[in-house]
Image (cartoon, grey):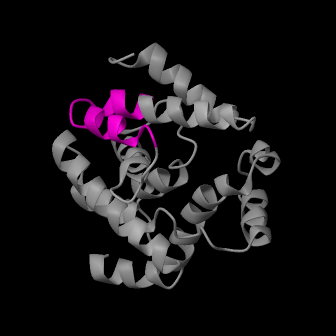
Amino acid sequence: MERSRALELVKKQLTDKRYMHTLGVTETAIQLANRYGADVQKAELAAIFHDYAKFRPKEEMKQILINEREDERLLAFHHELWHAPAGAVLVHREAGIEDKDILSAIRWHTTGKPGMTLLEKIIYLADYIEPGRAFPVVEEVRAIAKQSLDAAVLAAVKNSILFLMSKKQPVFPVTMDTYNDLIQNGDDG
């Protein structure tokens, strides 16, 4: 699918602010794909569609998770996590994207997962460090991303966990598993 067509489909699903975020994620994903040798076209499409379901009704997302037999633990966590797996399903159904790598990168962009592929890491990180993001540790992670993708993903996962803990929010178990996997199997732990 061409970039212009993908952006046209996505723009209808998002607020103006979220669309600007998506453009930032897309450019960041392209840069990371070029830097770390990933398929640039796949990174571009996954980034464009990563938040496709962000503003869908909670009940619709919940039904998708149930119908697709997603990890049932998701339903006990904040609905902000639902748009990623629901989005992968909807992007396949509504936009006709069939590439499993792209759909998986969309699927895991909020929680991460153990054994993330290069493309999954790029979309996860691009979402975290895109230029529109402004929070205390983002500059540090942007700097790390120029040196090591794995170290930057680890920093982003760790910071996300620490943020949730500081707010006394539960951490989705797969995100903890992602952290442990990166520490145990990463080159930059």
Of residues 168 and 179, which is closer to you in this image? 168
Tell me residue 90's x, y (percent): 58, 70
Left or right of residue 22: residue 177: right
Q: Is residue 2 visible?
A: no
| Residue shown at the point (73%, 74%) measured from the top left | 57
**Looking at the picture, how far across and down is residue 143, in whole percent?**
26, 36
Question: Could you tell me which residue is drawn at 43 percent across and 17 percent down?
Answer: 185
Q: Give the percent coordinates (x, y) of residue 179.
A: 53, 26
- Which residue occupies the foreground of this view, 30 or 144? 144
Magenta-colored stretch includes residue 22: no
Q: Main secondary structure of the magenta part?
A: helix
Residue 5: quadrant of the picture: bottom left
Region rendered in magenta: 136-154
Residue 100 drawn above or below residue 52: above
Please state, as top left, top right, bottom left or bottom right, where the C terminus lies in the image.
top left
The residue lying toward the viewer, choosing from 138 and 53, is 138
Q: Is residue 63 left or right of residue 27?
A: right
